[in-house]
Image (spheres, grey):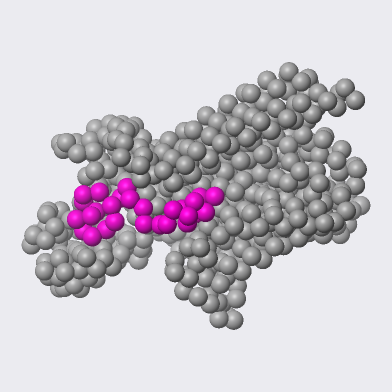
Amino acid sequence: MELKTLTYLVVGASFVLYIGIAIWSRASDTGDFYVAGKGVHPLANGMATAADWMSAASFISMAGLIAFLGYDGSVYLMGWTGGYVLLALLLAPYLRKFGKFTVPEFIGERYYSRAARIVAVICLIVISFTYVAGQMRGVGIVFSRFLEVPIGLGLIFGMGIVFVYAVLGGMKGITYTQIAQYCVLIFAYTVPAIFIALQLTGTPIPQFAFGSTIQGDSLYLLEKLDQVVTALGFAAYTDGTKGTLDMFCITAALMIGTAGLPHVIVRFFTVPKVRDARYSAGWALFFIGLLYLTAPAVGSMARLNLTQTIQTGSVGTETGNLAYEERPDWFRTWEGTGLLQFTDRNGDGRIQYYNDQNPEFTNQAESYGWKGNELTVDPDILVLANPEIAMLPDWVIALVAAGGIAAALSTAAGLLLVISAAISHDLLKGVLMPHISERKELLAGRISAAVAIVIAGFLGYYPPAFVAQVVAFAFGLAAASLFPPILLGIFYKRVNKEGAIAGMITGLVFTYGYIEYFKGLFLRWAGAPWAEDVAENWLFGISPEGIGAVGALLNLGIAIIVSKMTAPPPARIGELVDHIRHPR
Amino acid sequence: MEQNTTKNKYWQENLKLVAGCLLVWLTVSFGFGIILLEPLNQVQFFGFELGFWFAQQGSILCFVGLIFYYAWRMNGLDKKHDVEED
């Protein structure tokens, strides 16, 4: 069977599965719609959380990023998993005990303030839309590459599927489809990794292959990789290039941001008991870990495979580089997407792939007759091209396409649901129309989910200039705005509404301002970014990706100082805090 | 009043447990994976430099273990102080 037909079949079958589940698990009331009736088994919720959390970025981009960053890529590995420790120890059980539907609702009640709730809703909506735009883009890329349909059509397909199960099923529908999506994506991720590990090292388990010797060589994989890349002027794979403080701050910002992301937090509202919330976070990280422990192995093996495909012989010998005419098939297909580009700078018909930004290597390269790096590789293609590079059977390639779509759709659905809950439950029911009936609120939830899907699709088709800045922005904002007030709300009774609001606004403005200043987000028309995004300009050498950690600290500090200077919160708030601190 | 003091004790013990777990969390990631990277990298651990291994594998394994340990200990504390859900 032809690859395209096979891909259509596999992806189509996964869609039929998701829709079937959605019809089976329709939501019948607001409890089902917002929190799946609080009846999800902790293990099942852990799996759903893992799919909710692992986005197109985790599935498609992360291993590629690590492949090109080496040790520096560790910030993503530690940052996106360590946040679950914070979530499990500091937030999840207490928010479950609180027992309501949304994150802004907690902030509104704990700080006895509609204003606080509205600030939280605004943070939530900005974070979630930024994030969802990236997901829809991922769906579009997978569709256009594997199913060879235009990106727009791919987006409409993806939106249609999410529409069916998010609007019909609400949280309940999403939970069970996410479980199915987790199975699809983890299978799709692991199978090629196992094959590649076997080919390279003879060990089937990628995590062990990562630390094994290369087949037919006495060198360890990582030693070999360091040798191969440094010979071409790149930094050694196991060495970092980022400053220690910057590494520290980026990791912290990603961790705190993860713990503050509303679509992740809300998943812990769906389990029956407080003790389930604790275990559920453990299961979530276990299922996430299966992918996150594989990703760095995949990254290192892919980098080695790629480099050795191009640099076929010793560096500097005449025939040491791959002749363009002999390039493999996957090279041709990915050239078609523009994500892989070759320019023959020295006109020798061969591909030179090396670090031409390294001044020490320049002379050497010139002596070989090289006139600059000739190959640009978008890190996003590594995972998707991996099965082709390793010459795996067609069904594996089809599976990876289905996995990428599953990862993007599951995250998009989770995000759309928190957006719709924030609008129908927090804005409409909480502020604008407190007397709305439950049936009408459910309808409002469905309508806002539908509208959010259309906006998300639009953002995916016309990605705003800042999609590349999503990481810095969404995580920085979640870390600096939402995490601190929730944490203080549980652990420090003295914090009052003045403190919480002042803290949130400070964290938000500082973090947003810093990222805008160096990267340019919404104020590009006014001349942003205002400074070059390089280490010399940064505050204490902290990059915009890591500034959320500082924003979170500022938020905490301001909240405590302002609270101390103003009147303590009313007595009933102390009782509320006691209530959430104790499971019974 | 008496109920209040046992509840206080429950909360104090919880805080101690959280602090201990967070210390481990801090050590394996920020400590071993970032600050102590260079000295730990002098140690070879199978095919890895140890600091690099902590940054890309070890810390994640510790995180998973930590959460399950905390959940197990807390559920015990709930029982001990009789604040368990029915």
Q: Position of residue A199 (x, y in %)?
A: 24, 38
Q: Position of residue A509 (x, y in %)?
A: 67, 66
Q: Judge from the rendering whether residue A560 lies leftward or rightward of residue B67; answer left or right.
A: right
Q: Quadrant of residue A171?
A: top right
A211 and A461: which one is in front? A211
Q: Residue A238 colored magenta? A: yes
Q: Judge from the rendering whether residue B18 lies leftward or rightward of residue A182; answer left or right.
A: right
A244 and A440: which one is in front? A244
Q: Residue furthest bottom?
A: A526
A25 and A542: which one is in front? A542
Residue at the image point whose x is 41% and y is 38% from the top: B54
A288 and A78: which one is in front? A78
The correct choice, above or below, for A62 with respect to A491 in the image is below
**Is residue B11 in view?**
yes
Tell me which segment is drawn in magenta: A226-252
Residue at the image point whose x is 22% and y is 70% from the top: A372
Q: Judge from the rendering whether residue A161 lies leftward or rightward of residue A34; answer left or right.
A: left
The correct choice, above or below, for A472 with respect to A178 in the image is below
Q: Position of residue A581 (x, y in %)?
A: 77, 34
Residue at the image point whose x is 73% and y is 18% from the top: B80
